[in-house]
Amino acid sequence: MMKVKSRRMQKNTNNEQSAGTLPWTEPVFQELADNISDGVYYINTDGYFIFVNKSLSQRTGIRTEQFPHLHFLNFVDPAYRDRAKENFQRSWKEKRVFLMN
């Protein structure tokens, strides 16, 4: 199983972000993310992927257009899914990140 580091990005407060869109619309972000060797992703408040970079797609063998149909819990070891789901929900509610040790 691939180990993934996660950081929650702050959304742009100048405009509202809808549930299925990225907070960055500039092609610059897409190009930067696609040239990073680490996997980069963004998920919506429901836990579904709305962006993955080329590296994450290549590492998983999943095409980028398939990711919007996948939930992040599909990638979490079953032994940790309940805890990951709880931390994810708390993170959005409390606007902070919870690390699993």
Image: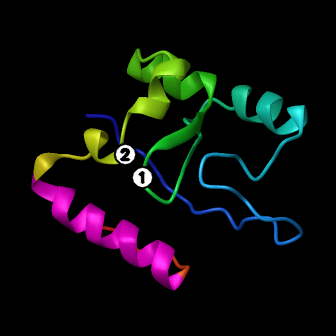
Q: Residue at x 84, y 42 (%)?
A: 25
Q: Distance between the residues labelled 2 and 1?
A: 6 Å
The region drawn magenta spans 79-94
The way the protein has been coloured in the rendering is: rainbow
- Asked if the magenta segment contains residue 90, the reply would be yes
Q: Residue at x 47, y 51 (%)?
A: 5
Q: Could you tell me if residue 101 is visible in this image?
A: no
65 vs 69: above or below: above
Residue type, label 1: Gly
- Asked if the magenta segment contains residue 52, the reply would be no
Foreground residue among 88 and 3 = 88
Q: Position of residue 15 (x, y in %)?
A: 85, 65
Between tags 2 and 1, which lies in front?
1
How many dots with numbers? 2
Location of the N terminus (image quadrant): top left
Q: Could you tell me if residue 89 is visible in this image?
A: yes
Which element is circle 1 on? loop
Q: Position of residue 78 (x, y in %)?
A: 12, 48
For disc 2, the marked residue is: 72
Labelled pair 2, 1 in contact (Cβ < 8 Å): yes
Residue 8, label in figure = none
Residue 47, label in figure = 1
